[in-house]
Amino acid sequence: MILASLFFAFIAAALHVFIFSMESVTWTRPATWKRFGVASQADAETTRPLACNQGFYNLFLAIGAFIGVGCVALGAGGSAQEVVGWTLVFSSCGSMLLAAAVLAATGRKYLRPAAIQGTPPLLAVVLGLLAVAL
């Protein structure tokens, strides 16, 4: 269960790095802003600072999850390093999961993106809790 949890935490982090790249690096490219439902290039330019900020939020969550995965993978069972790792995995992936829930609550058209964004961290958290509890 530990490996499965860490795998899904890694996938969640990688996905959030990809989201970061769209929101903070390629936001004003038509392929990106259309994917996010932005109506025009002018609207993409207007919303660029907000998207950039949101992108960095996603990057920081990803970094936390990556560090957590590394700490759990390299830490001895019961060590402080393992505890720090699980704390980072649960807090980072839990935040990703809650953000996906907020996205889903925003409207029906966001259910698919919320499922894509929320499934890997959900699996990481559930499998991680099972691994820690057993």
Image (cartoon, grey):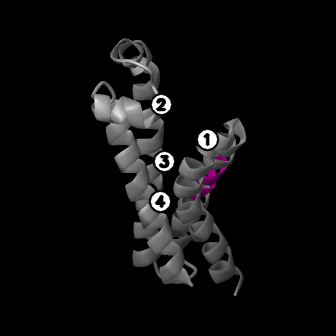
Task: State which region is magenta.
Answer: 93-98
Alpha carbon separation for disc pair 2 and 4:
22 Å
The tag earlier along the polypeptide, 4 or 1, is 4
Alpha carbon separation for disc pair 3 and 1:
24 Å
Q: Residue 48: percent from the left, percent from the top?
A: 39, 20
Q: Is residue 96 magenta?
A: yes
Residue beneath the point at 41% across and 37% down: 35
Q: Is residue 67 magenta?
A: no
The tag earlier along the polypeptide, 1 or 2, is 2
Q: Residue 15: percent from the left, percent from the top?
A: 41, 54
Label 2 amino acid?
A: Gly
Labels 3 and 1 touching (C-beta < 8 A): no
Residue 121 marker: none
Q: Nearer the viewer, residue 133 or 93?
A: 93
Residue beneath the point at 34% across and 17% down: 41
Q: Nearer the viewer, mark 4 or mark 1?
A: 1
Labels 1 and 2 touching (C-beta < 8 A): yes
Which residue in the protein does label 4 denote? Answer: 12
Residue beneath the point at 54% across and 48% down: 113
Which residue in the protein does label 2 denote? Answer: 37
Residue 109 marker: 1
Residue beneath the point at 33% across and 29% down: 27
The tag earlier along the polypeptide, 4 or 3, is 4
Q: Is residue 81 above or below residue 95?
A: below
